[in-house]
Image (spheres, grey):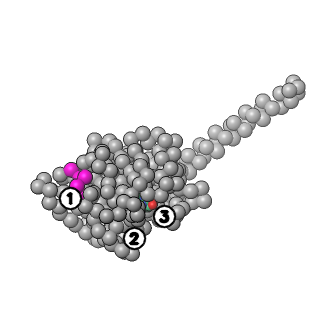
Amino acid sequence: MSMRRQRLTRPLLAIMALLGVMTSAWAGAKTAAELRRMVEDIEAMAADVAGETGIAAVSPRVLDVIATVPRHEFVPSEQKTSAYRNRPLAIGHGQTISQPFVVALMTELLAVKEGHRVLEIGTGSGYQAAVLAGLARDVYTIEIVRPLAETAAAAFERLGYTNVHTRIGDGYRGWPEHGPYDGIMVTAAPDHVPPALIEQLKPGGRLVIPVGEIWQDLMVLTKNADGTTTTTTVVPVRFVPLTRDEKEQD
Ligand code: SAH
């Protein structure tokens, strides 16, 4: 390279680097503002439907974690501009990432504490698992659609969610090797509660699950010390169906 070209290239590179830093700082500030708006929308919706859900408000601990998870990192590129709107989004393969309010509500209902080990059925985009990862010690998550499982696993790796453990397969039978769990969340709807999931709950543990056909009831099932269960129905919800792996069906 000639001296003259070098003299021109250096300042040009410096300007480009500066522009790069400014663009990412601007994008960061924009994301932070969008995240704050999304958390406000969740709070407003929680207050609106408190009469139906019986949950007066989403706890600060859950909202604080939601405020740190970059939802745009978990959605396909064509959905990134809508990532912080309080609505469900398509993630490909006919699947959807839940509305942020529903993520907040289900997380609240699971009552996750530090040190908990939780299982999620239906990794999808990985967003819900990332929220759980900020509250629990370990999150185990199963996804039946291979490309979705792989994309989510890559996102956990890229973003440093080292306490999320992924598996490809049919979550109907849970993941017994790492159980029993303090909490289990199902984000696809079966028409009945899978018995294996109750088995894999610790006494005192909670299972949050939508049960039904097209419209489902969001249910919270608590396992009592004597192994019996207590179930409460929270609100009607709409999730994609829990599909079964033909080979694994009873
Ligand atoms: N929790 C997800 C939303 C999931 S949508 C998120 O935060 O993005 C429901 C997901 O459940 C879909 O990705 C679907 O492929 C998956 N699913 C359906 N049946 C399943 C099964 N039997 N086992 C595991 N995952 C299943």
Kindly indicate the quadrant of the structure image that contains residue 106: bottom left
Residue 168 in the image: state x and y as whole percent.
43, 52
Quadrant containing ligand 1 reads bottom left
Magenta stretch holds residue 81: no
Q: Which residue is mark 2?
A: 238
First in sequence, mark 3 or 1: give its number. Answer: 3
First in sequence, mark 2 or 1: give its number. Answer: 1
Amino acid, disc 1: Thr
Disc 2/disc 1 C-alpha distance (Å): 22 Å
Q: Which residue is mark 1?
A: 222
Kindly indicate the quadrant of the structure image that contains residue 101: bottom left
Amino acid, disc 2: Arg
First in sequence, mark 3 or 2: give its number. Answer: 3
User: Where's the C terminus, which quadrant?
Assistant: bottom left
- Label 3 crowd bin: few (<14), some (14–19), many (20+), radius 10 Å: some
Residue sticking out furthest to the left: 226
- Say which residue appears at 47% left-offset and 58% top-offset: 145
